[in-house]
Image (cartoon, rainbow, N blue to C red):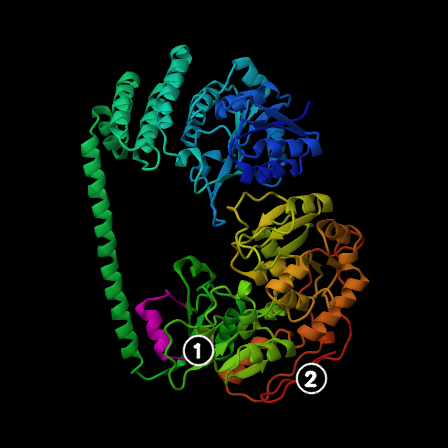
Amino acid sequence: MPRFSVIVPAYQVQAYLHECLESVLSQSYPDLEVIAVDDRSPDACGAVIDEFAARDPRVRAVHLPRNAGLGPARNAGMERASGDYLVFLDGDDTLTPDALLALADRLKETGEPDVLVYDYARTYWSGEAVRNRAAAELAEDGPAPFRLTDRPGLLNLLMVAWNKAYRREFVERAGFTFPPGYYEDTPWTYPVLMTAESIATLDRVCVHYRQRRTGGILRTTSERHFDVFDQYDRVFAFLDGRPALERWRPMLFRRMVDHLVTVYARRDRLPRGSRAAFLRRARAHYRRHRTPGASVSARARVHHTMVRFGLRRTYRALRLAASLRRGWGRIAGRLPRALRRAALRLHYRLQRLLPLRADRALFTTDGDRGHGGDPGALESALRALAPHVRTAWVAGPEHRRTLPPATRRLAPGTAAHWSALARSAYLVTDADVLPGLVKRKGQVLVQTRCGTPLGHMGLDLLERPAAARDTDVARLLGGVDQWDYVVSADRHSTLTWERVCPGRYTTLEYGRPRTDRFHTATGADVARLRESLGIPEGSVAVLYDPAHRDYRRTQRRPLDLERVARRLGPRFVVLSRAHHPYGGPAEAASDRVLDVTGHPDVIALCLASDALVTDYSPLMFDYAGLDRPVVLHIDDWEAYAAARGAYFDPRAFPPGAVAGSEDELIDVFATGDWCGARSTRLRADFRARFCPYDDGHAAERVVRRVVLGESELPPVVPPAGRRPVPPATAVSGPSSLTTVPPQQSAGPPAVTGSGRPPLPR
């Protein structure tokens, strides 16, 4: 007897059925059977099902003699099911990775409930995924299992069969089956929830609900949408025979009216000429099933009144008025914005007529993020070394807490922002272009860039259309012409930036300012950061930071992090940081995989972790200066290099161990290679090449050169004398972290205003 019987009805979904079945059979929880029902589909659905059944014994093919509809097809699957729990999945939808494992764990935790309700996300052809708006109803707080009377808000969820797992014995004992016709989920879901003795929730996206452009039932114009009336008759007939369920009648009545209005209001459902007949049927149903005393919200009273009295023309007039009101609102909304933009442009022009303020510095980051990165390090150094210069930071109100008390926050696009942009003598940014900037004589713009380049950048992207996408090269070069200084971490970065972003600027090859914190932080700072992130004491925290794949429209996480964490053992915790959404909404993190994507400070994440796993992310260059283990997981080098282009192959000159697959990565940690002598030696060579100046004083050198005008700068601390803050966990042996002293080598010479040291071998 399998744990799950996954029932998949199929009718005219040949383009999606393969992906659907693969999403089930590739689950990490293999104790399942798939009952795929060919509802006499005229396309190749039957052949696809037979192919899967021939190659995997867990698949049972069912071919119906005639087309019966979605409900009877599901019934045919239930008749053949033998699993503990029934799971329904439409043939054009998919299960998310590890969904069945999450279901199995939650069922065990909650004592085998009759029904387990889980979440879904709508997925669109563009790759966008939007999580269910009523996901708050699935919170796992409080006792579980429970009955519907304890959580009546579950009736606010989409009434479908495929967002729940049902105990088969409960379904068979109650005699539940699906009716024929459209909206067959309605007389199934309501009775199931109302009669279940035990219900539990799982706050996790387990189904990707495909929003097809054409072909779906809800996008098909047909008189079969009149079936909704019969389905609600079945729901209320179910109540009529069960007096104990009378408490639900008012809520079901309200849901029925909302549903009927939805069907009526959608232009693509009812055929032309049938809308009046539909509204007459709706009026009859309203009168038949109306419950005296049923409360209706003020917002829904218009709909109830329209259905109750059949006010079709009134409803059309109200919709027309609402449409006109929205149109006027858009016009009225644009006018004030246009006037405000014109006023700000005039304000900026007037401010440029005033003298520059030599005691003002304006800092900004790409995307107007919070205080951090290289601009953040330079801002802190400027306040320490040149206290007479007042600093301001451009950021939205959500980043207010990231700014130091002495730094003024300027909201982007405000008059204060434009005043600072016009009159500040020093401008510091890591964005390619400062929008709207008309650079004045005497203004100094310091460009910090966004990390050591591995993938192609700047002009090199002209030959890489997949990576360049909407890059405006002319706009980029216009921004380059405004740069006065470019901060560079090493000779490789210097040579690259000067070639791909050619301009008249001066390169300051002084190191990465943001890595200064690796040398100024203390063990107490590391402990405090780990506690704020929820890292258990004594755990080995692995920061996972994959790069964006230009050759993919939607991003997929290269690793199954839950599996990796389980295989590594209870001592390991994974900090997952994604630069881009992975084709789906954020999901609840587990106690073994912590989602730190939204954390505003990547340097803090580096300090809190004990090792880094990445592929092509520039973070590897910064992390190497921290002198903690780095492991590369590279399984698509050819595709990445073809789409993006790379300045060198990281596998040939890595900062540590290299894994070509997920299993190899697990083996690297299990055997201790990630922190062994070879990895330490590779990291030392990597640091010598890419971190020659990262000694904790990079920001100081930039400030002394640019703001204080000094030419003789502090000498660079040689690698042998650097002491980056050690990790919180320092143990030895396989699957453990080993802290090894940095390799002794001669450091680069002192940095001056005019000379550069040679590139280390």
10 Å crowding of disc 1: few (<14), some (14-19), many (20+): some
- Residue segment shown in magenta: 408-428
Which residue is more in the foreground, 293 or 172? 172
Image spot of residue 43 (x, y percent): 54, 34
- Foreground pick, 405 / 176: 176
Instruction: Confirm whether the magenta stretch covers residue 740.
Output: no
Residue 752 at x, y percent in the picture: 61, 87
Q: In this image, 661 relative to 410: left or right?
A: right
Q: Is residue 265 above or below residue 195?
A: below
User: Mark 2 and mark 1: span between their CA atoms?
Assistant: 31 Å
Q: State whether residue 506 appears in this view.
A: yes
Name the disc covering residue 445, or none: none
Label 1: which secondary element: helix
Disc with the residue nearer the chain's start (2 vs 1): 1
Tag 2 secondary structure = loop
Q: Report which residue position mark 1 lands on.
A: 478
Asked if disc 2 and disc 1 are in contact, CB closer than 8 Å, the reply is no
Q: Name the mark nearer the viewer: 2 or 1.
A: 1
Residue at image x 43%, y 23%? 181
- Quadrant of res 111: top right
Is residue 427 on the magenta stretch? yes
Residue 90 is situated, as x and y percent measured from the top left of the image, at 52, 32
- Residue visible at 38% across and 26% down? 224
Q: As drawn, is 185 to the left or to the right of 648?
A: left
Residue annotated with mark 2: 758
The quadrant the N terminus occupies is top right
